[in-house]
């Protein structure tokens, strides 16, 4: 009988060592990812400056080339469905779910030409990472000052039509790994509905001189499957895996007004959530199912 306490203690020690080993591997891989981000940002910044001389959306192709190599370090694979829906030569607002620091790899796998992102202002001060984001044309928003954020969004609305830009936004507003989608913030949808600079593509002289309406841009949802089968910050594991990326059909906004935004948010959230639950391979951690109704913010 005295043998059993020893065996139990040995088993518990073995389990502890396994857990510590997995946690150590997790932190090592995250540290490597951060080191790659800073190192590649410094090198890519130099290349962008030599190639284009400064800040321009054209630098995103250079940044994407570097970032797409990250997946080979981690054994990740991206299965992209219907990517041509992102390639149409027109301005649009692209919205996608936001899960972790690894989202940048997924973004660069499908990033279309002439596409800029919106990011929180704090990222601008992350040394070479902030520099490469600036050089890539990222628009930085101070989320603590709503008036400043609204000014940036208004300027972006004009530029996206005038310069034929696509804008990539995470409408959840923060990283979320709970196995479901958070309610969406409305900024991306107001941007799509109100992207009316007073000069439409049909009439360079101004909309008052022709019968054509101002251009409103469509919303293109992009959904990434759950990372939880290979990356989990709570359980501290980070292994290889496959991410399914589904590009949904564009949601038109022509003729909509600000009053239609809540319904537009709801339509987009429902479509993305249904797709997310369908393409994610693991059971949702919070017990959500495709039929339950998490409503977007009103």
Image (tube, rainbow, N blue to C red):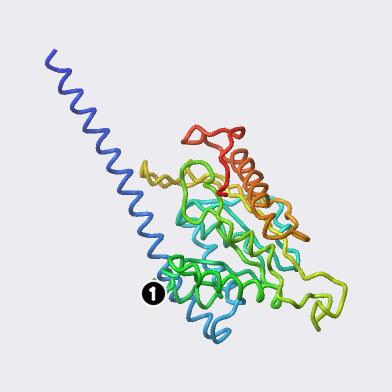
- Give above or below for 287 relative to 176: above
Residue positioned most to the top: 1
Crowdedness near tag 1: few (<14), some (14–19) or many (≥20) residues, C-alpha within 10 Å: few
Residue 119 to residue 297: above or below: below
Label 1 element class: loop
Q: Hey, which residue is sitting farthest front in the picture? A: 259
Residue 9 in the figure: left or right of residue 193: left
Q: Quadrant of residue 276?
A: top right
Which residue extends farthest right? 211
Residue 291 % position (x, y)? 61, 32
Give the residue displayed 73% in from the left and 52% down from the top: 249
Percent position of residue 58, x then y: 62, 77
Task: Decide which of 240, 232 is in the foreground and name it.
Answer: 232
In the picture, which quadrant includes the N terminus? top left
The answer to which image quadrant residue 124 occupies is bottom left
Residue 184 rendering spot, x and y as whole percentages: 56, 51
Which residue is rendered at x = 39% and y = 71% of the image?
126
Give me the residue at 71% from left, 71% from top: 196
Q: Nearer the viewer, residue 293 or 177?
A: 293
Residue situated in front as seen by the camera: 31 or 296 = 296
Residue beneath disc 1: 127
Q: Is residue 122 above or below residue 276?
A: below
Viewer-proximal residue, 234 or 69?
A: 234
Answer left or right for 125 relative to 217.
left
Q: Position of residue 89 (x, y in %)?
A: 75, 68
Q: Which residue occupies 29% across, 38% down?
A: 18
**Number of numbered tags placed on the structure image:** 1
């Amino acid at each position: 009988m005295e043998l059993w306490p020893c065996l139990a203690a040995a088993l518990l020690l073995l389990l502890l060592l396994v857990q510590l080993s997995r946690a150590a591997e997790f932190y090592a891989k995250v540290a490597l990812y951060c080191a790659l981000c800073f190192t590649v940002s410094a090198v890519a910044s130099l290349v962008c400056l030599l190639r284009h001389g400064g800040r321009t959306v054209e630098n995103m192709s250079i940044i994407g080339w570097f970032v797409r190599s990250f997946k080979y370090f981690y054994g990740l694979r991206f299965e992209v469905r219907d990517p041509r829906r992102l390639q149409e030569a027109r301005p649009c607002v692209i919205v996608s779910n936001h899960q972790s620091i690894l989202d940048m790899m997924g973004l660069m796998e499908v990033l279309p030409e002439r596409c800029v992102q919106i990011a929180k202002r704090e990222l601008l001060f992350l040394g070479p990472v902030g520099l490469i984001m600036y050089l890539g044309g990222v628009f930085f928003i101070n989320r603590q000052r709503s008036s400043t954020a609204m000014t940036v969004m208004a300027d972006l609305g004009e530029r996206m039509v005038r310069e034929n830009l696509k804008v990539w936004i995470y409408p959840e507003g923060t990283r979320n790994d709970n196995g479901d989608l958070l309610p969406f913030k409305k900024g991306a949808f107001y941007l799509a509905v109100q992207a009316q600079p007073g000069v439409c593509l049909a009439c360079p002289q101004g909309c008052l001189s022709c019968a054509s309406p101002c251009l409103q841009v469509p919303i293109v949802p992009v959904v990434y499957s759950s990372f939880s089968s290979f990356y989990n910050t709570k359980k501290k594991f980070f292994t290889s895996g496959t991410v399914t990326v589904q590009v949904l059909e564009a949601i038109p906004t022509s003729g909509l007004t600000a009053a239609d935004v809540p319904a537009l948010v709801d339509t987009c959230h429902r479509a993305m959530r249904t797709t997310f639950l369908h393409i994610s391979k693991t059971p949702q951690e919070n017990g959500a199912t495709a039929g339950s109704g998490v409503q977007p913010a009103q």
